[in-house]
Image (cartoon, rainbow, N blue to C red):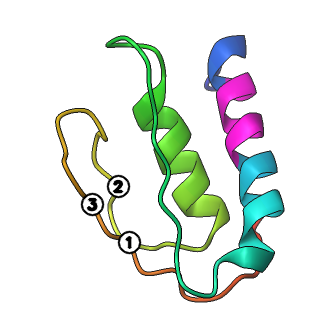
Amino acid sequence: MKRIPKKIKTTVTQAKTLAHEIAPRLQGGAVLALIGNLGAGKTTFTQALAQALGIAHSVSSPTFVLQQTYPIPNTQIHL
């Protein structure tokens, strides 16, 4: 059994909550700015958000990226 630290569970829950809130308004896409120190959980958050939005592409770290585009197949949330 794999144990997931509480901080990661909280980050994933927050990403899923955001996905649920923004999905109905994503017809033209969205721009999100993530701010945080190295190791703050930006990649975990981004990967969980992408998964909740149904993005099948591999999601890389948002740090040091000027722009990254991920097509959203539909607005159905995967909770």
Q: Which residue is mark 1?
A: 70
Marks 2/3 in contact by CB < 8 Å: the verdict is: no
Nearest to N terminus: mark 2 or mark 1: 2
Q: With respect to residue 54, does 17 lie above or below?
A: above
Which quadrant is the C terminus positioned in? Answer: bottom right
Tell me the residue at 59%/74% (across/down).
54
Distance of label 2 from label 3 (alpha carbons): 9 Å
Q: Is residue 44 above or below residue 1?
A: below
Picture quadrant where residue 12 is located: top right
Tell which of 75 and 44 is nearer to you.
Answer: 75
Image point (73%, 76%), residue name: 25
**x%, y% of residue 55?**
50, 72
Percent position (x, y) of residue 70? 38, 71
Q: Nearer the viewer, mark 2 or mark 1?
A: 1
**Residue 10 left/right relative to 60:** right
Q: Is 31 in front, or is 53?
A: 31
| Residue 12 drawn in magenta | yes
- Evaluate if marks 2 and 1 touch, with contact meaning CB atoms under 8 Å apart: yes
Q: Is residue 28 above or below residue 65?
A: below
Instruction: Identify the residue position indicated by label 3 in the image.
Output: 68
Q: What type is the residue that disc 1 sits on?
A: Tyr
Question: Mark 1 and mark 3 in contact (Cβ < 8 Å)?
Answer: yes
For this view, does 50 lie left or right of residue 36?
A: right
* Residue shown at the point (47%, 59%) measured from the top left: 31
Q: Position of residue 27 (x, y in %)?
A: 63, 87
Q: Residues within 10 Å of mark 3 (few under 14, many from 20)?
A: few
Tell me the kind of residue under disc 2. Val
Q: Please, what is the dominant secondary structure of the magenta stretch?
A: helix
**Vertical relation: 18 (above or below) 53:** above
Give the magenta range.
Answer: 9-15
Q: Secondary structure at mark 2?
A: loop
Residue 59: assigned label: 2
